[in-house]
Image (cartoon, coloured by chain):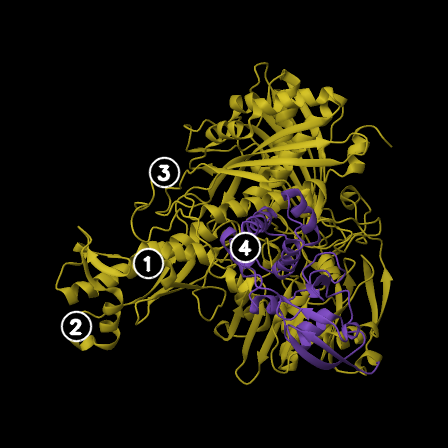
Chain colours: A purple, B yellow
Amino acid sequence: MTDKMPVTLTINGEVVSRHVSPRDTLADFLRQDLQLTGTHLGCEMGACGACLVLLDDKPIHACLMFAVQTDGMTIETIEGLNDRGTIADIQEAFHQRNALQCGFCTAGVLVTAYHLLKMNLTDSREHIRDELSGNYCRCTGYEAIVDAIEAVARDRRAGLVSVREDVDA
Amino acid sequence: MNAPLHSIDRPNSYIGRSVSRPNAKRLLAGRGRYVTDLMLPRMLHAAFVRSPYAHARIVSIDIADAKAMPGVRLIATGEDLSRICKPWLGVLDHFKGMKSSEQLPLPTDRVVWAGQAVVAVVADTRAQAEDAAEAVVIAFEEIAPVVDIDAARAAGSEIIAPELGTNVCFNTKIDTGGIDGIFATAKHVVEEEFTFGRHTAVTMEPRAIVADYNPSEHQLTVHHATQTPYQFQDLYSRHFGVPEANVRVIAPDIGGSFGMKLHVYHEDMAVVGLSMMLGRPVKYVADRLEAFLSDIHARDHRVRARLAMDEIGTILAMDVDDVTAVGAFSSFPRTSVVEGNQVVRLIGTPYRFKNYRAELSVVFQNKVQTSQYRAVGHPIACAVTERLVDMAALRAGFDPFEMRVRNFIPDDAYPCASPSGFKFESLSHEVCLARLKTMMNYNGLRAEQAELLKKGIRRGIGIAAFVEITNPGPAFYGVGGARISAQDGAIIKVTPSGEVQCQISVTELGQGTETIIGQIVAETLGVDRERVKVMTGDTDNTPHGGATWACRGAGIGGETALQGTKKLKGNILTVAAAILQEKPERLDIRNGYIVDADGGQQRIALAEVARIAYFRSDTLPPDTNPQLTVAHHYAPQGYPFAFTNGIQGSLIELDAETGFVKILRHWVVEDCGRVINPMLVDEQIRGGVVQGLGAAFFEECLYDENGQLTNGSLADYLVPMAVEMPDIEVAHVETPTHDTELGAKGCGEAGTAAAAAAALNAVNDALAPLGAAIGQIPMTPARILRALGHK
């Protein structure tokens, strides 16, 4: 067994230092070492999107990255996004439109939604569907998710919701 | 008939309203409580050594090296676990003559599918357990694998379970008589051979279990991602010899199930045994490959069917031969026969014809077990029926809508029965058909299709009517000897602050069970929905019940909650009447207040009644005896099943050069009786449709000739993605069942039941001008090109 290696990174706004096995994925590190269990594993090969987190504010698959690779980087998970209120309008739209059922894929979907809305990749339903295609959802059939993201995009464009600026990024 | 239970203007009127799900908020915050996420003190982790062969004898197992690996706590074989776990047998008495072989958590002598767990390794971490699993050495002696349904039944085939002497699990026949004569003289006969691929549930959360045996109390607690905690409480008790009262099964948030997580799995039984051997919690979560190799699969049917019709387009008869392969044994406790049985009994059910013959053969093969998955049998029955109806329509020159108008059971002809013996209380095919035609703008679509064809654009339009089995009574499993409950139970109580808690045996899988139960309790009692908390999924804290499967949560669970709440309301009004010196029948509850039944004048707050009952019973008349907690059980009575119906429409565009199909639109008109929450029903329909479209175009578990699964990953097994799926328009017709006061039937499987059939008809509609046809799903581009004559 290879010795554990030290890593120091920022997770959800806090500096975290730990020793990790070189073979530990970022997903396992988040879930097991830090008990950030909102990030889920669905395929462990970067296909399903359940494990999406933000690395330096861009979505990445936590199952495809080793924890040791994240030294010095900034990670944000669903717990962080939730706590700093930056996706409150997305969460509310998902809740009202029932854009989730079992909820297992939802953290990854919210990470994608956060990114799409931030980058203005929401000009049409087709575009939203295209961008969402890295997130597998077995329950909803996707339409409610598209509706919810479309509604948030509309409201944000109309200035109905003030989005809190990034606190830590 | 379709009047609401209460006036929609009445306070606390929730039944029939699209309200959001309170429990969805924690899921949106990343605060779900899935078994996958669970960590317990001193918890260990299991991994399994799996068979690389589909069929082999186990010659020897060497665990010496593995045992010495870091962190390893226990390595257990089939022999070890057989000492503490009684075998199980997946047969039911009402399937006469069905056979299967006894199963143990891990095999002792033979492996019967590639990927079967053979040895369990328990270690401090999952990684250590997997490392040690690689060091276990098993010597196998290969046996010829049985993979093909015809070869399995041929003389001289290798027999998978030698003690049975055959690879045939079950045969059944339905024959109303005179079928050959009808076909010999009919004006039109159409026939087709259909092939339905094996597919699987692909829940986003794979199977997960934490078994926690505490020897000091002889207490077994199992945190189990399952739809059916009570069934597993019973099973764990019986198979491991732990008193039922000492077995607690907790099913917290579940990351998708769709029927897949209510079957007995070898690994799950092993994990319970491992925890008992160690006296510590043991966790096992299937990884995605393990899920593909060991979750139940479904479908895998070959159906040869024909339909006879007279010169004016009246269907005279259907004749069906269904052969299905179910893996190496029948699943437990629901068996692997139910799907085939439902196929042969559901075929033709929307239609009036009375002459029917069907034969079902259920065959063993060296692949993973199949069993009940969303819409069990319905997609096959529907596709066979509706494709043949379209073929007959084409042959005789009728439009598909016209063909159905001529042959549906009229809406005023109920009650009636199908040739296969199903009894229908009241269905609405005619009104659903008319609604669909308007919704689709069918005539407009046909005109557009013709115009586009001139430009070389090939559109296809398909429709498919269905009948769905919901609200099953004991006739489904109980009569066959399965210890699976058809009833449900609820405990409903008023807290001292006048709030309400409902502990109920139907379970939440994300479909909204807790929400609709809350709606029913709040409306029936007369309180704000936010004052009602619903709890599910814990056998220690809820009454025993069937839980959630076969579309029974709303119909049976909802009626349980309704009747229990009425009982509670009566008790509350009795206490209130004593306080107010009034007759109970002159009082009602609205918005959390006891009011005059006439006029609605507020008399006293529910909270005040509860305060007096709990803390100042001395101020009540001596015989008041307040009962502010009630328990209520309800089992379906009347019809054995509450059948529902509906019809779906599909619009696709075919690229005849590449075989690619673009799904453009999908429509559903559905009748699930009383709709409790329209938004949640619509989302069940949409999710179900997409699973059905997955089966129609993408999903298939592919095996090679050696019985090896060749696409066990989410990159190789294709599930529908957002970009491939259309918007789905849903409408409802409400024909409540009169067997209950609530009138609700099920809706969770309706989408899946007919989506593939509608798509199959749409693709064939696009192929027809090219003189081509397809009878196989999934309709992959390669298969469509083959249908078009390409090699």
- Label 2: how many Cα within 10 Å (few below 14, some 14–19, many 20+): some
Q: For this view, does B532 lie left or right of residue A90?
A: left
Give x and y (percent) for residue A91: 54, 59
Protein chain holding label 1:
B
Circles 1 and 4: CB atoms closer than 8 Å: no
In terms of depth relative to the viewer, which is nearer, B169 or B257?
Answer: B257
Q: Furthest residue to the bottom?
A: B216
Residue B107 location, quadrant: bottom right
The number of discs equals: 4
Q: Please report contact status of discs 2 and 4: CB closer than 8 Å, yes or no.
A: no
Q: Is residue B96 left or right of residue B162?
A: left
| Numbered disc 3: secondary structure | loop
Q: Earlier in the sequence, mark 1 or mark 3?
A: 3
The three-letter amino acid code for the residue at tag 3 is: Asn
Chain letter of the residue beneath label 4 in the structure image: A
Q: Chain of mark 3?
A: B
SS of the residue at dot 4?
Answer: helix
Kindly identify which residue carries mark 2: B620
Structural distance between the alpha carbons of marks 3 and 4: 31 Å
Q: CA distance from mark 2 to mark 3?
A: 42 Å
Q: Amino acid at mark 1?
A: Thr
Say above or below: B347 vs B455.
below
The residue beneath circle 4 is A94
* Residue designated by label 1: B565
- Residue A51's spot in the image, x, y percent? 69, 63
The image's mark for residue B2 is 3
Q: Are marks 3 and 4 on the same chain?
A: no
Q: Tell me the CA gap for discs 2 and 4.
A: 48 Å
